[in-house]
Image: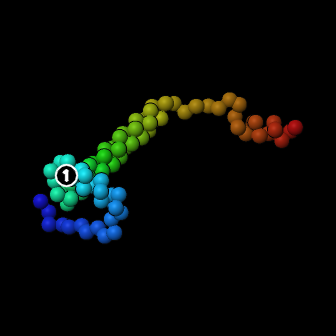
Amino acid sequence: MSDKTLQIRRLPDDVYERLSFRAQRQGRSLAQQAVVDLRTVSEAEASAGSRRRAVVQRILADLEERSPRTLVPAPEELVREDRGR
């Protein structure tokens, strides 16, 4: 266990009450419950980030596998045609 500490000043009443309720329900001190809650949030964010990276990697791999598309008609042809109107 680390010796690092965190002090929170001006904790809103509603946040304190919810933290206190969860701590009592779980048989923990306020400090212990705060650590559990912070760890839960931190792990959820890390997990969400991992999922996002995996999705991006799948999309990039899919794009690399596809052959380049040829646009018909070519965009420049459409511009020239439009200018001729």
Residue type at the position of mark 1: Gln
Query: Which quadrant does the C terminus fall into?
Result: top right
Drawn side of residue 50 relative to residue 31, left or right: right
Q: Secondary structure at mark 1?
A: helix
Q: What's the image's color scheme?
A: rainbow
Query: Could you say which is closer to the camera, residue 7 or residue 57?
Result: 7
Query: Which quadrant does the N terminus fall into?
Result: bottom left
Q: Which x, y percent locates residue 36?
A: 22, 52
Query: Could you say which is closer to the camera, residue 14 or residue 66?
Result: 14
Query: Could you say which is closer to the camera, residue 49 or residue 8?
Result: 8
Drawn side of residue 23 relative to residue 50, left or right: left
Q: Who's the residue at 69% across and 34% down the image? A: 74
Residue 45, compared with residue 71, is above or below; it is below
User: What residue would you read off at disc 1?
Assistant: 24
Residue 37 visible in the shown view = yes
Q: Who's the residue at 65% across and 32% down the image? A: 71
Q: Which x, y percent locates residue 47?
A: 31, 44
Q: Which x, y percent locates residue 20?
A: 24, 56
Q: Who's the residue at 33% across and 57% down the image? A: 15
Drawn side of residue 80 relative to residue 36, left or right: right
Q: How would you rate the neighbour count of disc 1 (Cα within 10 Å): few for under 14, some for 14-19, many for 20 or more? A: few
Quadrant in which residue 5 is drawn: bottom left
Quadrant in which residue 54 is drawn: top left
Q: Count every numbered label the image shows and give the total.
A: 1
Residue 35 visible in the shown view = no
Quadrant in which residue 30 is drawn: bottom left
Q: Who's the residue at 16% across and 53% down the image? A: 28
Q: Which x, y percent locates residue 65?
A: 45, 31
Query: Could you say which is closer to the camera, residue 16 or residue 44?
Result: 16
